[in-house]
Structure formats: structure tokens, C-alpha cells
Amino acid sequence: MDNDSKIENGQQAEKPAAQPVAPPADERPEYNGRNLEEAISLAEHRLKLPREQFNYEIVTEKTRLFGMNGKEIVIRAWPKDEDADNAAEKFLAELMTVFPLDLTYQVKKRADIIFVIFDGPDKTTLLRNDGSLLLAIQHVLNKISPIKVQVDCEFYRKRKEKKLKEYAQRVARQVSDTGREEILDLMNPYERRIIHIVANEMPGVTSESIGDGFLKKVKIFRAPR
């Protein structure tokens, strides 16, 4: 008997089972450890799931410097939802049918990250204005996907990371030598993450994000002793 017949006969139609929904990024539980393995093991214990059954992402900006060498790794972890895990790929497939640029793309998936590599006749348009359109697509994909998404085109990320790392190293050395804190210009999360990693690799120097919203400034300063 179908659902319409059940309703006509006064019977309650069965509702389809609710599908698990991945929590928003800022509501996902966090787990910390002295290294990534320790943090993942804690997530396994708390979630009561093997690591193959949950997604996780490293919260790079919460990496903290303790003394000279110790660092704390913080991750967010949440149970896998197969439909949600494919959200980025479904969105891309629909986007390309209406997008005004002639592009192709490849998707490479790992347990904790999705890589999207763009190509095609109009690929250089993605890289104009310091890759603003490329990063905008990445931002949208990360809003709808429970798994972190990284997009790339023509090795943009590699070239961008090289410039940011060199910049962060110069500033961190300056802070270490002078003791004066430096506040950098507004950056997106991807750029800030690189700055934080490099700054915290310099002994006696640390960093933090300042402000609210998508774009924030980064302060680099001497670590408290």
C-alpha cells in the first residue's frame, strides 16, 4: 500500500528516515593533542567511531606555542554523511552548466580534504586580481561541504604559498629581532593559515587573528614567556 492509500484509510504515512546533517563548521566538536595522531585518537574515543567513519579538519589557527618546542594540535571531527560529503561535487556539476566560463575540473578526494583543480580555455580568468574568483569559488564550496575544499589552477596555490611564506618569515624575523609586534593587512582564511604556520615555526614568536568576518588581520608578536 502506498503512502497516499494509507492517508485515505486514516493511517499515518511513514515519514522517511531523517538523514544525518553535518553540523556547521563553528559547531563541530574540537579535539586537541600534542600531535595529529593523538587528537584523532581522542576524537575516536569521544565519538565512539573508528577514524574511517568520521571527517576531520585541522584548526590551524588554534595551533599554539608552548615554550620553545611544544605545540598543540586542534582538530574538528564529525560523523560522515555520504550525501553531504558529495555536496561539493554536486554543486560543481550544476555550476558548470550555467557558468559563463569555459572550464574543466578534476576532483581528488582524501579522508579530510577535497582538491578541485581547474583547467580549460578560460582558466586565466580565475587567476585575475590575485585569484579572487578562484578563491571565491573555494569559499562557496567550503560553505556547502562538510569536508574542507581546496581549489587550484595553474599551480596558483603553490606560487601564492611561496610568496606568503617568504613574507611571513621576514615579518617574524623582524618581530623576533625588535620585539615590536606587527599587524598585517586583511587576509582570507587560506592566507591567514599560512601566516600562522610560518610565524609559529619561529622560536619565541607567535600569532593570532584579529577581527570578525571572512577577512581578518593577523598580529605577529613575541610569545609570552
Image: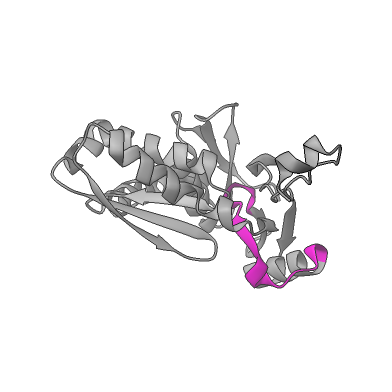
Q: Is residue 147 left or right of residue 77?
A: left
At 22% across and 51% down in the image, what residue appears?
154
Q: Is residue 30 left or right of residue 196?
A: right
Which residue occupies the extreme left position in the image?
A: 121
Q: Is residue 98 visible?
A: yes
**Total marks placed:** 0
**By what rule are the colours in the image chosen?**
one colour
Tell me: residue 116, above or below residue 91.
below
Residue 51 at x, y percent in the picture: 67, 70
At 45% across and 57% down in the image, what residue appears?
114
Which picture quadrant has residue 209?
A: top right
Q: Is residue 171 visible?
A: no
Residue 129 magenta: no
Residue 110 at x, y percent in the picture: 48, 65
Which sits in the foreground, 207 or 74? Answer: 74
Highlighted magenta segment, given as a residue range: 46-63
Which picture quadrant has residue 80?
A: bottom right
Which residue occupies the extreme top position in the image?
A: 212
At 63% across and 53% down in the image, what residue appears?
63
Residue 8 at x, y percent in the picture: 79, 35
Residue 52 magenta: yes
At 42% across and 46% down in the image, what residue appears?
168
Which sits in the foreground, 200 or 117? Answer: 117
Residue 199 at x, y percent in the picture: 51, 50
